[in-house]
Amino acid sequence: MPPPPLRTFRSGLFRTIALAARASPFALAAMALAGVLAGIAPTGMAWYARRVLDGVAHGDRQAVITGIVAEAGLLLLTYVAGGLNQFATARLRLALGFLLQRSILEKAIAVPYACFEDPGFYDALSRARREAVGRPVALLAGLFAVAQALAVLGGSAALLFRFSPLCALAILLAALPGFLTETRFATALFRLQNRRATEAREQAYLEQVLTRDDHAKEVRLFGTGPAFLERARRVFTLVFDEDQALARRRLLVGLVADLVALALFYAVYVYVALRALSGALTVGDLGLALVTFRQGDGALKQALGGVRGLYMDQQYLANLYDFLDLPVPAPRQLAPAARAQDEQGLRFENVGFTYPGAARPALAGVDFSLAPGRKLALVGENGSGKSTVLKLVAGLYEPTEGRILLDGRDLRAWDGEALRARLAVVFQDFVRYQLTVRENVAPRAAEDAVPDDAIARALARSDAAPAVGRLPRGLEQRLGKLFSGGVELSGGEWQKLALARAFLREGADLLLLDEPTAAIDPAAEAALFERVRAETAGRMAILVSHRFSTVRLADEILVMDGGRIAERGDHDTLLAAGGRYAALFRLQAAGYR
């Protein structure tokens, strides 16, 4: 059962205040002080304005001067409060925005990898990032504005009671229709925007396709620009039409609420004016009543609107806090990195795996062993389960059936850092960091200093050293075209850098290579793998490749088909068997004749 709305509101408000105090206690205190000062001043200004009017009516020069000076001082106080509030709000927006953005990013790297293949997770992430910067500060600013308005309202009510309790009641009645109207339509707008998270992401994606450099070639060559632009227009039109329909209804109902407030104000105006005509009130009383009513009416509207705003801001912030509260797997009592003595290597035992939300398994009944120093190749058509095997070995997923053992110990019992220390991985969709060469080879260099000679060895092993040697700034050269001064590499050169990133892990004894040389020419690929084979003696390696010139270097080859192992053996054995491997090999060989 979800918690009551009031309890949820309170917990969200207290959480935001606690985060603000952590981000910038000075800014939070300054905003509170500014609210107090701005709340006290209007009542005093109205009182001294009455003294000025009565002083003028009675020819009391001293009262006039005293009232004007006091009113000017209070007005100056409001200016100081406004400036302080503006400064503190800007400071808090930056500090709290950074704190929350960091929290979002920390959550993103802590959740399981499977989240990144779930569209619902991306919707939640999009909503959280949208609300992280401005919404918490808006909530706090609204809170202090409500406190300020209540202070003004309290002073106005006290002054109006001097004339009639009905005047104070009229303030409440005048503001209530507008409050109910705004609350109703703000809630409707929140639900509308929350429901449109997917459309917002689609529009952002279409804009990205039309503006990114890695899409620009195909957009122009295939003439897809107008088509994508039309799709973006349709998404915008859908959003625009829904917003406009809601805005029209809000306008009409709001006008009715304003007419009610206007009628009540002029009723009070007439009542006070008639009492002044009868001599029951002075000119100063008349001015005080009218100014106080306007102030009180405005303060009550501000207070009610602020409460509505607080409620709405908290609804939006619930998206942020729901994301930050996503469960992260608790640390387990895991095994140390020491290896068992009775069994070495990697073993799959009847392993099956089904991707979340998928109708059929990606792997079923997969069994194989890989001893230290041995090289295993996986071949098969796209979607046969090759890359899934590597993801399971890397610990990105856990098997839904069976188990995977490394040195006789279930992978689920391995500490994450200990397991990653034993792996060197290159996936086919490797990352091209728009950073320096050094940061591409050693992304963790900022936290773990990496000697230049270690980077040089990794570049040499991956055959990336010649390309790096031609760059103007060597290891310090920024790559890519996203930032000024960057140099773009060819696809093969980027891939060699990704290989160097894996080869930097000299202590890793299990290499996972998923189409790691697809952008490299066959001759260079064969030479590269001969060198890798020689330099990784004693290490295990699993290779996924469609090039049989490379696959034949493996000690054992598994032919995957529909998530199962259809054939196994070395290159010569599989060719002699005349099965699927032999057919694929002959088909590829025919292309070179």
Image (cartoon, helix red, strand yellow):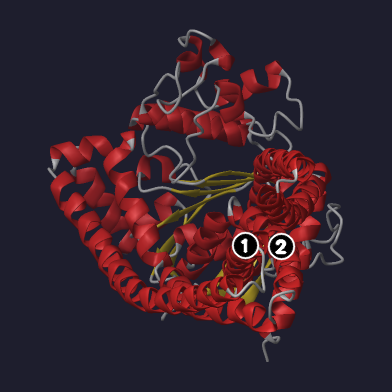
* Residue 345 image position (x, y, % from top left): 70, 55
Decide: is 384 above or below 252. above
Q: Name which residue type carries label 2.
A: Val
* Residue 130 image position (x, y, % from top left): 52, 56
The dot on residue 152 is: 2
Disc 2 or 1, which lies upstream in sequence? Answer: 2
Looking at the rendered structure, the secondary structure element under dot 2 is helix
Give the residue number, with chain letter if any, for mark 1. 295
Task: Tell me where residue 113 sits by quadrant.
Answer: bottom right
Decide: is 528 above or below 147. above
Give the side of residue 300 with respect to residue 577, left or right.
Answer: right
Q: Residue at x 48, y 73 (%)?
A: 266
* Residue 315 image position (x, y, % from top left): 59, 72
Viewer can see residue 509: no
Task: Tell me where residue 295 sits by quadrant.
Answer: bottom right
Q: Residue at x 66, y 55 (%)?
A: 141
Q: Quadrant of the C terminus?
A: top left
Q: Residue at x 70, y 51 (%)?
A: 58
Give the side of residue 153 with respect to residue 362, left or right.
Answer: right
Viewer can see residue 233: yes
Task: Tell me where residue 257 sits by quadrant.
Answer: bottom left
Looking at the rendered structure, the secondary structure element under dot 1 is helix
